[in-house]
Amino acid sequence: MKLFTGDFFEQDTGAVARALLGHYLCHETTGGMMVGAIVETEAYLSVDDPACHASRGLTERNAAMFGPAGRAYIYLIYGCHYCFNVVTGPVGSGEAVLVRAVEPLEGSALMRQRRGLACSNRDLTSGPGKLCQAFGLDRSFNGCSLHEKPLYLAVNNNNMAYRPLQVTPRIGVTTASDRLLRFIVKDNPFLSRR
DNA sequence: GGGAAGATGTTCT
DNA sequence: GAACATCTTCCCT
């Protein structure tokens, strides 16, 4: 499996969010391997984007966003759910791509066990909080590299199977909600929303 | 199948 | 003390 290199994530954040669709998120744990195909992302920009955590400057919480591209930014939202982001752009830019949903390809039994629910495959990873729980991601992965095991992003040579794409406003944000920064695989059944 | 509301804790004002 | 890049349960149809 071929991994993405550093320069890929240093591109424009919107371009990275779009380009990641159809590629793989992989996590090798002691319990087993988990792989999902990315079907939904959102871009969070540094300028003119009040919805981005980095828009109010560097804090202890968002420090990972200001670090090198290709690392994870993971935080707790609503007191009970984690969100997984990929840091993008040049160092210090404070931009990232939120991975909102993946299609489970390998390790779905393990994902269901981590979720602790008798849910369908569609409910395993169809949302940022669900996906983090299924993949076993928490704040201990904040700032860790996505270029190496156990957590990494890998190239799907057949990613064009995940087409066509569609662009929509972002979900759940209360500011800048008119900006088209959500990228999805059109009509994929594993999206967080239609 | 769909809408409403509560849970929950960290961060920032 | 309010806001928050959400999920689940409960009740309705």
Image: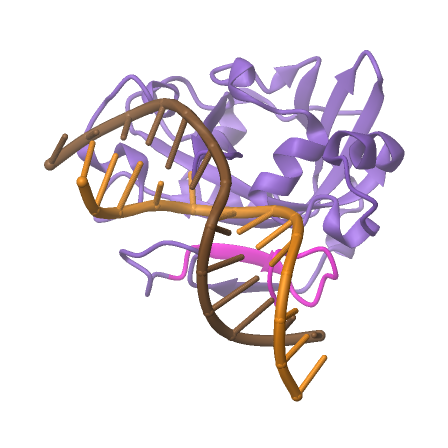
Chain colours: A purple, B brown, C orange
Would residue A19 be found to the left or right of residue B1 on screen? left
Q: Main secondary structure of the magenta part?
A: loop
Would residue A18 be found to the left or right of residue A130 on screen? left
Would residue A108 be found to the left or right of residue A128 on screen? right
Q: Is residue A171 visible?
A: no
All told, the count of numbered labels is: 0
Q: Between residues A107 and A79, which one lies in front from this camera angle? A: A79
Q: Is residue A46 visible?
A: yes
Would residue B2 be found to the left or right of residue A78 on screen? right
User: Residue at 82% across / 31% down in the picture?
Assistant: A113
Q: Please say if A38 is above or below A61.
A: below
Residue A128 image point, x, y percent: 57, 42
User: Residue at 75% across / 38% down in the picture?
Assistant: A36
Q: Which segment is the magenta one?
A: A180-194
Q: Quadrant of residue A125?
A: top right
Q: Quadrant of residue A157?
A: top right
Residue A72 image point, x, y percent: 51, 23
Q: Please say if A177 is above or below A76.
A: below
Q: Quadrant of residue A174?
A: bottom left
Q: Between residues C13 and A180, which one lies in front from this camera angle? A: C13
Q: Considering the image in quadrants, where does the C terminus of chain A appear?
A: bottom right
Q: Between residues A24 and A105, which one lies in front from this camera angle? A: A105
Residue A185 in magenta stretch:
yes
Residue A185 image point, x, y percent: 65, 59
